[in-house]
Amino acid sequence: MEQPVQTETWKARSLEELVRILHQIFAEDKVSVEEVQTLLESYESNPEEWLQYAKFDQYRYTRNLVDSGNGKFNLMILCWGEGHGSSIHDHTDSHCFMKILQGNLKETLFEWPEKKGNGEMTKKSERVLRENQCAYINDSIGLHRVENISHTETAVSLHLYSPPFDTCNTFDQRTGHKHKVTMTFYSQFGERTVC
Amino acid sequence: LHTLLAKNNRLGGPGSLPKGLGQSPLARSLRVLNLSGNRFAEVPPALLRLRGLRSLSLGGNRLHGIPPDIQELRSLEFLYLGGNFITAIPPELAKLPSLRYLVLCDNKIQSIPPQLAQLHSLRSLSLHNNLLTYLPREILNLVHLEELSLRGNPLVVRFVRDLTYNPPSLQELAGRTVKTRNVPYAPSDLPENLVRYLSLASNCPNPKCGGVYFDSCVRQIKFVDFCGKYRLPLMHYLCSPECSSPYSSASQSSTSQSESDSEDEAGVAAHRMQKVLLG
């Protein structure tokens, strides 16, 4: 993504409209990170619109595909039970946007480990994202861990990845060792995926 | 009443739960109870009479411990105790036969009792953000475990040179002899406390050693190596320093311990656990 030829300030008034505008934006050759982030932040989360995608699992967070963006991007909803968190992971050279639809999520940024990682990974920063906020990350920024640190509330987030990817690396915080994993969808377009 | 959600209140003082809860119809009907985000400093005893309870959440309270009588909740499948001040886990927790999901994250737990491996139904165990330096070797026995979170614990990464061994007492030596020589005894032959003592014998994990131990054992940490990517420090108990570990071929002396032991025989269990830890 480079500097935009034409920046619009979009306002998505519903999830449907959000998806429609995203298709429009990604139809162009050049897409601006700022434009997408602003668009995602502009959408005011309305649970009625996304409840059908919000399928929770008892034991871990779930990934629920909402739209496959004509191959240009994946839009998905992640559901986090109390205490659920992700491993430290990278984003396979893709852009990653994360918008909070409900609850709060803590994002901890990490430096890439040294080539032959053999020490504790370095924490860069951490923050708690609130409802409707949108964060952005890519591999040049670093790695992150995302967690729902609440013991009383669940959390729901909307993620956009471009280009889409289904494998990434997870990292052991104590040693920096990485391990490739394949990501799967708990549901697609509102239907539970049977593995 | 089947489900009661009372989270984010100020419950915790005496009289928080209605008197006679244990005798009420609720004791049989209640399946789901959520008391997270309150001010309970201990698990209210009345709660333990809810025999039909399947799901209990006391996350984000002020608990300092878990009562052994938690085992009364025979139907419990889901137990959320994250975000408290719990320092220890009673072995009685392992007596919950249906427990599938156990959350103990964000507490002050220093060790996991090996008995927890008896939770045969356990699918998910959340231990992140505690004070664990090692895990019991028995954790590898949890065959149905799919999720295990360990981050934010000061797990040792190096071999710990601390093999303190308290020689066995006369009572222990006598107990060992009774067990290994199969000396017959009946409850009428011995005081009740000794009968109970004899029932607590643990088998030495070394298959070549038919011995047992009671309180006196050697503790040593060995690292289970998951294909070089993830090393978990597991605590092994052996009946004596001369007894070799089931996972090594030669007997050990404290001076010849190498810093990077790797497990050969824990193969199957390690492979399974690798998927759980790295997935």
Image: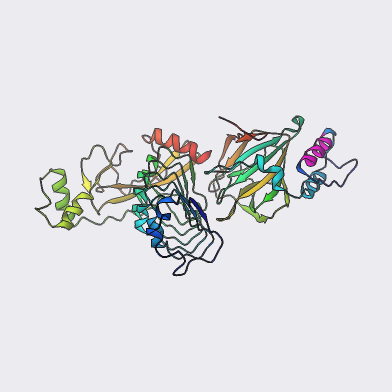
User: What percent of the width, then of the height, locates residue A41?
Assistant: 77, 49
User: What percent of the width, then of the height, locates residue B77?
Assistant: 43, 46
Q: Is residue B169 left or right of residue B140?
A: left
Quadrant the N terminus of chain A occupies: top right
Residue placed furthest toward the front: B25
User: What percent of the width, then of the height, locates residue B205?
Assistant: 28, 42
Q: Residue at x 30, y 36 (%)?
A: B249
Our reading of the magenta stretch's main secondary structure is: helix
Q: Residue at x 83, y 40 (%)?
A: A2
What segment carries the magenta color?
A: A16-26
Q: Is residue B35 magenta?
A: no
Residue B263: image quadrant is top left
Quadrant the C terminus of chain A occupies: top right
Nearer to me, A12 or B94? A12
Above or below — where is B71 with respect to A140? below
- The number of numbered badges drawn on the structure is 0
User: What percent of the width, then of the height, locates residue A115?
Assistant: 61, 41
Q: Is residue A23 magenta?
A: yes
Q: Can residue A38 be seen from the camera position used here? A: yes
Q: Can residue A113 be seen from the camera position used here? A: no
